[in-house]
Image: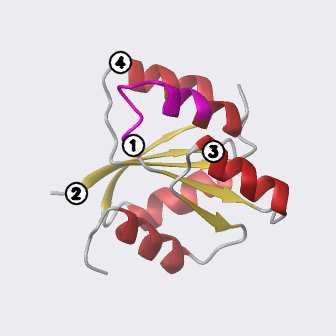
Amino acid sequence: MKKDILIVTDNFEYRAIMEKYLSGSFDVKITGSAEKTLSMLEEGFNPKLIITEFSVSLPNGKRLIIKIKENSKYVHIPILVISGDENKIMRLDLIRTGTTGHIMNPFILTDLESRIKSLLNIAV
C-alpha cells in the first residue's frame, strides 16, 4: 500500500515533475498554497509526510510549518523542506520550526525519493 505524501509548491513545473516521478512509489497529493494545505488537513487528510518549499505562498512556508507543528492533530507529520537558500539563519529557522529534514534546490529526483523513504522508514 502506497503512503500518502503531500507536496506544497506554487511552482507548476515542480508539481508536474515531482508528481510524475514520485507517484510510482507514493500516493501523491499536491497543493499550490499553504492555505489549501491547511484546509486539506482540517478536512481530515492525514499524509505520512509533507514536502514544502520554504518560500511557498499564502502564508509563506515558514508560517505553514509553524501552524502545522502548533496543532496537536498534525504535529506528528514529518515535514521535508525544499529550499535554494543555504545560510545559517535559514537552517536555524528550519530547526526552530520543527522540520524533519531539508533538501537543497535544485535536487536530484532519486535523492529526493531516497530522502522520503528514509524519513518514512521504507527500505531504499
Q: Are marks 2 and 4 in contact (CB under 8 Å)?
A: no
What amino acid is found at the position of numbered circle 3 in the picture? Thr
Q: Which residues are magenta?
A: 66-77
Marking on residue 43: 4
Residue 33 shows in this picture: no
Q: Is residue 9 above or below residue 13?
A: above
C-alpha span from label 3 to label 4: 19 Å
What amino acid is found at the position of numbered circle 2 in the picture? Lys
SS at badge 3: loop
Marking on residue 9: 3
Marking on residue 77: 1
Which of the marked residues, 3 or 4, is nearer the chain's N terminus? Answer: 3
C-alpha span from label 1 to label 2: 16 Å
- Quick one: quadrant of the C terminus? bottom left
Residue at the disc numbered 2: 2
Q: Is residue 29 left or right of residue 99?
A: left
What amino acid is found at the position of numbered circle 1 in the picture? Ile
C-alpha span from label 3 to label 1: 17 Å
Foreground mark, 4 or 1, reads 1
What amino acid is found at the position of numbered circle 4 in the picture? Glu
Which of the marked residues, 4 or 1, is nearer the chain's N terminus? Answer: 4
Place of residue 53 in the rendered image (x, y in percent of width and height, measured from the top left): 66, 49
Which of the marked residues, 3 or 1, is nearer the chain's N terminus? Answer: 3
Q: Are marks 4 and 1 in contact (CB under 8 Å)?
A: no
SS at badge 1: loop
Place of residue 51 in the rendered image (x, y in percent of width and height, measured from the top left): 52, 51
Camera-side residue: 33 or 38?
38
Q: Is residue 2 left or right of residue 82?
A: left
Q: Residue at x 26, y 53 (%)?
A: 3
Place of residue 32 in the rendered image (x, y in percent of width and height, measured from the top left): 61, 36
Which of the marked residues, 2 or 4, is nearer the chain's N terminus? Answer: 2
